[in-house]
Amino acid sequence: MSRNRYDMDEILEDKFDMDQLKRLARYLHPYRKQMVLVLALMLSSSALVMLIPKLFQLEMDVYIPAGDMKSIFLLCGLAIGIVLYSVVCLRIKISYTTRIGQSIIHQLRRDLFAHLQELPFSYYDDRPHGKIQVRVVNYVNNLSDLLSNGILNTITDLCNLVFILLFMFSMNTRLTLICLCGLPVLVLYIVLLKRRQRYAWQVQSNKQSNLNAYIAESINGIRVTQAFVREKKNVAIFNSLSMSYRKAWLRACYYNFLMSPMVDLISTITISFIYVIGVSYILDGNLSDVSVGVLISFTVYIGRFWAPINTIAGFYNSVLTAVSYLERIFETIDEPVKVKDAPDAIEMPEIKGDVRFEKVSFGYEEGIPILKEIDFHVTPGQSIAIVGPTGAGKTTIVNLLSRFYDVDEGKVLIDGIDISRVTLHSLRSQMGVMMQDSFIFSGTIMDNIRYGNKEATEEEVIRAARTVRAHDFIMQMEEGYYTQVNERGSRLSAGQRQLISFARALLNDPAVLILDEATSSIDTETEVLLQQGLNRLLQGRTSFIIAHRLSTIKNADRILYVADGDILEEGSHEELLEKKGHYYELYMSQYEF
C-alpha cells in the first residue's frame, strides 16, 4: 500500500520492543569509559550526601544535648565539604553527559542521513518528503535529553535508593517497612498506565509526522496553490492537522503527568504515617525506638527516597516516548537498500561505450511489468534516441542503465561487463545523467555546475556553459557565475535551470551520456544553438536521448520506438519514416498542419 499521503498514519507497534533500546545502547558503547567515570563521581557524591541526615541525627541526639560545640562545628564543616564536592561532581557530570549525548545524537543522525543517500528512488516515491525529514530532525532531537541526562541520572537514582534504604534500615526497621508499603501500589499503577502512555506517544509522533509532511508539501507547491486560489482550503487542512497534533500532544502529556501526582500522593501518605507513628513513640516515651533526631533524619531520608522514584518514573516516561521515535528512526535505517554493491563487486574499468541489453524484464511493482525481455546493442560512440508514448518505459531503460534500479530478469552489459557486478561509484562516475526535473541546489551557479566534478577549474566550467549556451544569461546576472541561487532555482526560469543542469552533466566528461527530456523547457531558438554544441559533444561518445519533440533526435544514429514493454521499431530517422509504422505516425502527429 502506498504511503505517499500526508494524512495517512503509520502502523503502530503493539508491544514495547526492548530491541530498540538495545540498538540505542550500541551508540553508547564508544563512550563507556567516560560514562563509568561520571557514574563513579556521581555515586561517590550521592553516598556522601546521604551521610548528611545521619550527621544531623548525631547532632540532635548526641552533641547538642552534650553541648559539644567542637563536634557540632566539625560536622557542619563536613556537611559543607560534602555539598561542595557534590557541586563539583555535578558540574563534571553535566559537561560530560551533554557532550556524550550530543555526540550520540550526531552519530545517529549521520547514520540515518547516510542511509537515506543510498535508498532507491522507490522509497522516496512512496513517502512524503516531510515525513522523512521529521525523522532526521525532530525525532532524533527528541532523544537528546534521554541520552544527555536520563540514563546516568537513572542509574545514579537507583543507587541512591539503595544507599537511602541502607541508612533507613540502620536507623529503624519498622519505619522503613512502613515507608515501603506504598511501592506495590505504585508498581501496579505504572503497569496499568504503561500501555496507554506508549500508545499516546505513538499517536503523537504520527500526527507530528503528518503535519510536517503537509507543511513541506504546501511550501513546494505554493505556486500551484496560489494559481488555483487554494489558500483558504489549505489553511483549513493545515488547521485540521494541527488540531489533531495538538490533541494527540495534550493526550500524551496528560498520561505523562499522571505519574508524578501519584508518586507525590503515595509519598505524602507514607510520610504522614511515619509522623503519626514516630510522634506516638516519642509521646509514649519510647525514645529507645524513635528519638527526635531519628524522626527528623528519617523524614529527610523519606523525602529523598521518593524524589529518585519520581525521577525514575519521569525517565520511564521518557523511555516510552523515545521508543515511539526510535521505532521510526530504526525503521528507516533498516529499510533495505535494493540497489547496492555485491560482496564481490569490482571496479568498472574505463568505459568505452559498448552497451547491450539482453532479455531485460523489469517492473516497479510485482506482477506489473514495464519492460518485457527487451534486447538491443549499442556500439561505442553511437547516439541512440528512445521515443514512444507516455509510460512506455523510456526513462526506465536509462534508469536501468544507470543502475538506479536492478533488473528483474536478464542482463545489462557495458563493454561486456554485467553492471550488477561492478561498484555503483565506479559505474555512475563515468556516466552523465540529465533528468527531466532539473534540480538546482542552494549556492552559486558555479557550485551547481561543479556539483559532479568538484575539481573542475573555472575555465572548464565556463567552457561547459558556453557549449550548452548558458554562458550569456549567466553573465547577465548580478554576480555572473558566483550569483547565489535558491533551492530548486526559484530565481531561474525552467529553461535556465535545464541549461545549468546540462552544463553540470557535461562537465563530468562522461563516457556515456543520458539526456532524459533534456531540452523540454528550452525555447526553439536556444534549442537550435544548443543542438550545434551537442552535435560536437556527442561525437565519439555513447549517448541515450529521450525526447518527445522529435525535431531534437533527427540526427541520432538510431531511434528505438518503445511501447507495450518492448522495442517495436528501430532504425534511423529516414528508415523509420519509410516504414510508415509507429514512428511515422508519431512524427506525422507532431508535424501535421
Image (cartoon, rainbow, N blue to C red):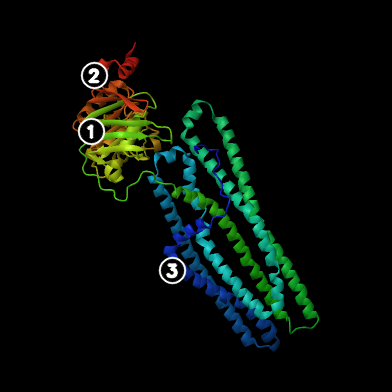
- Front residue of 191 and 478: 191
Q: What amino acid type is highlighted by mark number 1?
A: Thr
Q: Residue furthest left?
A: 540
Where is residue 304? Give x, y as percent: 64, 70
Q: Between marks 3 and 1, how big is the CA–CA gap?
A: 57 Å
- Let me know if residue 189 appears in the view: yes
Residue at image mark 2: 575
| Residue for badge 1 | 542
Pick whichever, 261 or 471, lies toward us. 261
Between label 2 and label 1, give the one nearer the viewer.
2
User: Callout 2, which amino acid?
Assistant: Glu
Q: Earlier in the sequence, mark 3 or mark 2?
A: 3
Nearer to the camera, 80 or 511 = 511
Q: x, y (%) of residue 461?
A: 25, 38
Provide the residue designation for mark 3. 33
Alpha carbons under labels 2 and 1: distance apart: 21 Å
Q: Nearer the viewer, residue 238 or 185?
A: 185
User: Going 54% across and 67% down the picture, which residue do you hit?
Assistant: 155
Image height check: is 569 above or below 446?
above
Q: CA distance from mark 3 to mark 2?
A: 75 Å
Residue 319: image tag: none
Q: Secondary structure at mark 1?
A: strand
Q: Quadrant of the C terminus?
A: top left
Q: Answer yes or no: is residue 504 visible.
A: no
Label 3 element class? helix
Left or right, 429 with respect to 121, comes to left
Instruction: Farthest residue to the right: give it.
Output: 284
Mark 1, other Cα within 10 Å: few <14 / some 14–19 / many ≥20: many
Mark 2 vs 1, N-terminal side? 1
Query: Disc 3 vs disc 1: which is toward the camera?
Result: 1
